[in-house]
Amino acid sequence: MVEKQWYESLFENYAQKYESECFTQGTTGECDFIEQELNFSKNLEIIDVGCGTGRHAIELTKRGYSVTGIDLSESMLKKAEEKATQENLSIPFLQHDARALPFENRFDAAIMLCEGGFPLMETDEMNYEILKNVTKSLKQKSTFIFTTLNGLFPLMHSINEFHSKNTVEGNATYDSKNFDLMTFRDFNITKIEDDSGEVKELECNERYYVPSEITWLLKTLGFSSIELFGAKLGAFSRRDALTPNDFEMLVVANRGS
């Protein structure tokens, strides 16, 4: 039997609690930004990678877009389907590993927000496979919008201090044990209480990326325009230049334009 990775264990019975986490509360403002970047073109097909409980997919569908949500977690997808049904929305929510997507040259745009897959993988190669598979799923003229952990932040700030300031009672807690400067991976203990009331302590590691890495990776995949911004929760904006004070970076990449 293959042992589950920490991110599989994290999301296997967490859909209800996930929706109360502070980092999931910015959906409306984030979708406002996505719409602006897509020039409000309602004829575009969008893939939401690591869609979780479907918060962005549902909001964008309500605004008139055609969205397909994919995620690795069966329980998160079930919650997304329940929410869509309640809203009388028909949205394909499909279980796929983002490192092996079955699509090719199909979508006009991709979103991948709130670290739903990238950059949680065990190796840099696996993280790159996510970028590669999303790109494969996109048409030659396309837009890719995603967030990732900003490698400049832990060089100047304490990860634990950041999390302690943003922790709400009952939500997940993070205890960073070691940020490895050789690999830019943060090794931490994440503690959650799942939907059954079971408390889980998971040994996690997450990859932080510096701007030049993200730019180079996307250039190798054929994106000609790559712009990086600070990712403010629920308030994505082109006015926010990326700095070491931003815990996350917001990436907007275009090709074929």
Image (cartoon, rainbow, N blue to C red):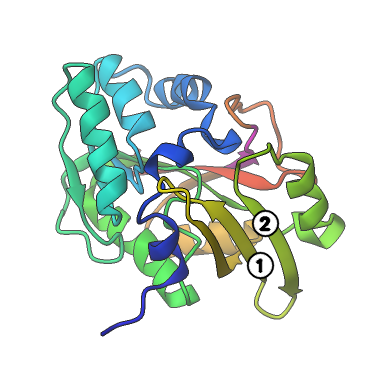
- Within 10 Å of disc 1 (Cα), the crowding (few <14, some 14-19, many 20+) is many
Residue 188's label in the rendered image is 1
Q: Which secondary structure class fits the magenta region best?
A: strand
Q: Write the residue at 54% across / 28% down.
A: 25
Q: Write the residue at 25% across / 52% down.
A: 74
Q: Earlier in the sequence, mark 2 or mark 1?
A: 2
Amino acid marked by disc 2: Tyr
- Compared to residue 242, the image places residue 27 above or below, namely above
- For the residue pair 170 and 41, the one nearer the viewer reads as 170
Q: Is residue 150 magenta?
A: no
Q: Secondary structure at mark 1?
A: strand
Q: How many marks?
A: 2
Occupied quadrant, residue 67: top left
Are discs 2 and 1 less than 8 Å apart at CB?
Answer: yes
Query: Extreme front residue here?
Result: 197
Residue 26, horizontal then vertical, whole percent: 54, 26
Q: Write the residue at 23% across / 65% down.
A: 100
Q: Is residue 212 left or right of residue 39?
A: right
- Within 10 Å of disc 2 (Cα), the crowding (few <14, some 14-19, many 20+) is many
Q: Quadrant of the C terminus?
A: top left
Residue 174's label in the rendered image is 2
Amino acid marked by disc 1: Asn
Residue 57, horizontal then vertical, whole percent: 31, 31
Q: Which residues fall within the magenta stretch?
A: 228-232
- Compared to residue 175, the image places residue 124 above or below, namely below
- For the residue pair 163 and 191, the one nearer the viewer reads as 191
Occupied quadrant, residue 23: top right
Q: Is residue 139 left or right of residue 256?
A: left
Q: Quadrant of the N terminus?
A: bottom left
Does residue 221 appear anywhere in the picture?
no
